[in-house]
Amino acid sequence: MKKINLLFFIVGLLFLSAETYGKKKPTVDLWPAEVSMQRLFRDIRETKDDSLAIQLHRQIEEILAQTLAIPEAYKYKFDSLRMIGKIYAPHKDFRIFNWNHSSRDGTYRYFAIIAFPGKKGAPNRVIRLTETTDSIARPDQQTLGPDQWLGCLYYKIIPKKRGKGGKQYYTLLGLDMHNLKTKKKYIEILSFDSNGNPQFGVPIIELNGWTKHRVIFEFSAKQSMYLEYKWFRRRMEFDHLAPLMPYLVGEYEYYEPDMFRDALKFKGGRWKHIKDVQKPKDRKLKKSSLPRPPKHSSKEDRKEKKQLKKKKKTVKEQPEEQPEEQENVLDSGQ
C-alpha cells in the first residue's frame, strides 16, 4: 500500500504544480518525481540487502515510467539523476533510460526504459525492458522481445536503413560488467515491428564467417575493450580479443586485446567484417632510447678515459691492427 500511495502522491504533485498564465499552455513541474528517485537511490546505497535494493530499483522504475508518460518529460534532462544513463536516438526518435545494480556477490542487475514522444500533446509511449539474461540460450542467434532482454548499459545508438525506403535499424553498443571474472560488450540490433514494439536481434551481422543476430564480446574483468563507432569512417571499430595462451581458448577471464583492431561496415543492408584495420607498429630502436653510460666523476675514471683516447689515436696510426685494437677498446669500456 505504501508503494501505491507513494506513486499517486508523486503523480498528483506533477499535475497540481501545473500553472496557467493567460493563454499559455500549462507547465508541469517534474522536480518532485526527480527528488523521490534521488531518495530511493540514496536508500539503495545505504542498504546491504540485495533483495531490498532490487525492490527499491523497481520503485524507481515505476516512478520513472509514470513520469516519462507526461509529454513534457520527453525533453526533460533529469540532470540530478546521475545514476541513470540517458541517451537519445539520432533525430530523437526515442530515448533510452538505463541503470544497474551492483550486488554483493559481484554480479550485476540491469534496468531500462524506452520512451517514445507522443503526437500533438498525447502521452508519451513508455516500454520497460525485463532482464532475462541467464535464461537465454544461444543469445547470438535469437530475436528477443522487451520481456527477454540481455541486460547491459547502452552508450551509443547508430541508425541504419536497408536501402532507400527500407526498414530502419538501430545498432546499440552496450557494456555489461557481468561478474568478478569477466566483462562483456554488446553489438545489439534494435528494430520495431508493425505495432511499434521493440525487437532485439536481427541476423544482419557477418563476423568470422558467421551470420549473427548480435555480437557478444567477453573478456577479462581486469581489462578494457575498445568498441566505438567512427562517424567519419562510417564503421564500428573494436579490439581483437585473444587468450593469453593457446590452451586457454574459451576461458574468457584470460582474454584481452592483442593490439589488433577489426571493424564492421554497413554495406548492402548488412554489417560486413573487415579484419586488421589497425595493426601494432614495429618500432625501430632509436639512439635516444638507448641507455647512456654513467658520467666519469672521479680522478681514476678521468685517467681511464684519457688512456682510452690515447689507444684510439694509436689505432688510427696503425690501421693494420685496427680490428684487434677495436675489440680490446670495447672490452675495456664495458
Image (cartoon, rainbow, N blue to C red):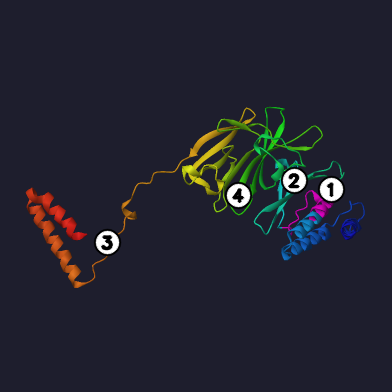
Disc 3 designates what residue? 293
Distance from the alpha carbon under mark 2 to that under mark 3:
62 Å
Crowd around label 3: few <14 · some 14–19 · many ≥20 (10 Å): few
Q: Are marks 1 and 4 in contact (CB under 8 Å)?
A: no
Disc 2 designates what residue? 95
Q: From the top left corner, tell me how far across and down residue 165 is, in percent.
A: 72, 27
Q: Are marks 1 and 2 in contact (CB under 8 Å)?
A: no
Distance from the alpha carbon under mark 3 to that under mark 4:
46 Å
Question: Per the image, is 73 magenta?
Answer: yes
Disc marking residue 183: 4
Q: Are marks 3 and 4 in contact (CB under 8 Å)?
A: no
**Residue in the picture at 56% in, 30% down:** 209
Question: Per the image, is 257 magenta?
Answer: no
State the extent of the magenta-drawn residues as a range: 60-81
Disc 1 designates what residue? 71
Which quarter of the rendered picture does the N terminus lie within? bottom right
Q: Where is 138 relative to 16, above or below? A: above
Crowd around label 1: few <14 · some 14–19 · many ≥20 (10 Å): many
